[in-house]
Amino acid sequence: MNSTNTFDFDALQRNVIAKGLCTRCGVCAGVCPVGIIGKDEDGYPIVTGNCISCNKCNLCCPGGDVDFPLLSKQIFGTGYDPLSLTGYVEEMYIANSINNGVREAGSSGGVVTALLLYLLGTGKIQGAIVVGMDEKKPYLSKGILATTADEILAAAGSKYSITPSMEVLSLLRKKEGRFAIVGLPCQIHGLRKLMEVDPQLSGKIYCILGLFCNCNLEPFAAKEAIEIKGIGLADVGRFDYRGGTWPGRFQVTKRNGDKIHLNSLTIKFTMNIMFRLFGARRCYLCVDALAEYADISFGDFWAHDYIGKLAENERCTLVYQRTSVGMTILQDALKNEVIQLQTLPQQRNSIRILNMTREKKQRALLLIWQKSKHGIPIPDYHFEIKKPSFSERRILFIHHFYNLIIKLHLRKPIVKMLFSPPGKVIDGMNSCRKKWFGNYKGN
Ligand SMILES: Cc1cc2nc3c(=O)[nH]c(=O)nc-3n(C[C@H](O)[C@H](O)[C@H](O)COP(=O)(O)OP(=O)(O)OC[C@H]3O[C@@H](n4cnc5c(N)ncnc54)[C@H](O)[C@@H]3O)c2cc1C
């Protein structure tokens, strides 16, 4: 390996990984033409062979640099508005898969899976990059190139854990045809950079389907949650982040077939706490909650936040169509009776999603502002970050409070308590607080 050349993996190591900016998206491994980028057990890139100094890993990396204004111009032909919560959106929909099996396999309305199955079935794609669980260690997630309907269906459902699934891109080089890619915001930032850097690989991408993303868990979070409940890892046959009755809970299926719910809390409350206790640090510097550069973005649609007819759409996916590629896919799938699609007027966009997005953006901008003041490495998103007002800085109080809990090694006892009966009481109190004082209801 040429370790003196700055255009090689060493530069990535120095400028991104060592500085705590790596998102663990896997794009560097996926774009490496000689396949010498592997990963360690936490998902961070490592070098495994001779670097040819092509610099592609650095050019595509979204860890230290994502030019939001440039991406907005390239993809939508518009400027970037840092104050917009949703990013560029053409239409919003509430949708669900018409096939009940697919809808039930999905985390929300099974729409992502339904679209992938439709694109594969009609020959528009030859496969899709999705995320499944490891066969040997079923509590760990991994990227998969699914080329059959069975593989796509088996990978349905959200895996709320850091997964460098874009490493699978490298498999596309040897494949004929075009592929759909399901990714999180950071992965899509890397993919969009890749599309400028590697025309050969870019030509294999049919569409980018993005998932909304508040945060992502460290890969060891599921393992710790299982251990906290006293289940031996060797007994785990399957782990689901949203198993059982929709909207689901953390669920272990033991090798003997027994199903065990780790928590009795609502999935929303569980994820809120888990993200704060086990969230990947780099996620806190991310300003994109809604996969702003996907062709279509997907998130949960919580019907109980709504009144009137919209309240009848439980178990659906909230869909933002952003590009003409996205529009064609949705309209074709609708025409072919693959999905049900109902327009959601902009003014009735989910208040819950907007709140989540506002909080994620504000927290990231505050942290970036604070770190830059102390000379700590930060990602460059190519727009001005204003000095926050004193009241805005309150958000950091909660962030630092959870950091303290982590430093004091209190996360295990807290999760243990939350996964026991008192946790249910706290969850109930939190739901009441939101119902009485929150602004979700009545949308
Ligand atoms: C880490 C994470 C955080 C999320 N945060 C939010 C949130 O805060 N608010 C919200 O409304 N929605 C969030 N979502 C999205 C939501 O959970 C659903 O994925 C989305 O609503 C689509 O549902 P669906 O039933 O249409 O998709 P499905 O039919 O279930 O298909 C989901 C597809 O995504 C793939 N996938 C699963 N996990 C990953 C992953 N980690 N990386 C890349 N691809 C993956 C699956 O393999 C499958 O192809 C998050 C998802 C993830 C993975």
Image (cartoon, rainbow, N blue to C red):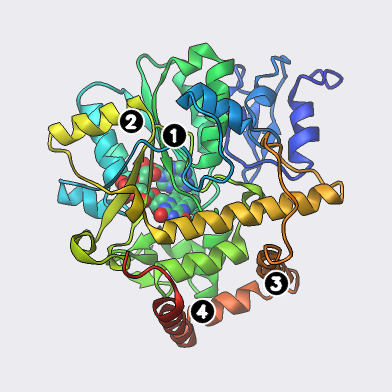
Who comes first in sequence, dot 2 or dot 3?
2
Who comes first in sequence, dot 2 or dot 4?
2
- Judged from the image, the secondary structure of the residue bearing numbered disc 2 is helix
- Judged from the image, the secondary structure of the residue bearing numbered disc 1 is loop
Q: Is residue 386 left or right of residue 246?
A: right
Q: Position of residue 110 (x, y in %)?
A: 27, 48
Three-letter residue code for mark 4: Leu
Read off the residue under disc 3.
401
Picture residue at 46% right of the left edge, 79% below the top:
430
Three-letter residue code for mark 1: Ala
Of 38 and 441, the residue lying toward us: 441
Q: Residues within 10 Å of mark 2 (few under 14, many from 20)?
A: some
Where residue 418 is drawn, which disc sits there?
4
User: What is the spatial separation of the Cα atoms under label 2 and label 4, in whole angstroms?
Assistant: 40 Å
Disc 2 and disc 1 in contact, CB within 8 angstroms: yes
User: What is the spatial separation of the Cα atoms under label 3 and label 1, in whole angstroms?
Assistant: 33 Å
Mark 2, mark 3: which one is toward the viewer? 2
User: What is the spatial separation of the Cα atoms under label 2 and label 3, in whole angstroms?
Assistant: 41 Å
Who comes first in sequence, dot 4 or dot 1?
1
Mark 2 Cβ inside 8 Å of ligand 1: no
Read off the residue under disc 2.
326
Mark 3, mark 4: which one is toward the viewer? 3
Mark 1 Cβ inside 8 Å of ligand 1: no
Three-letter residue code for mark 2: Gly
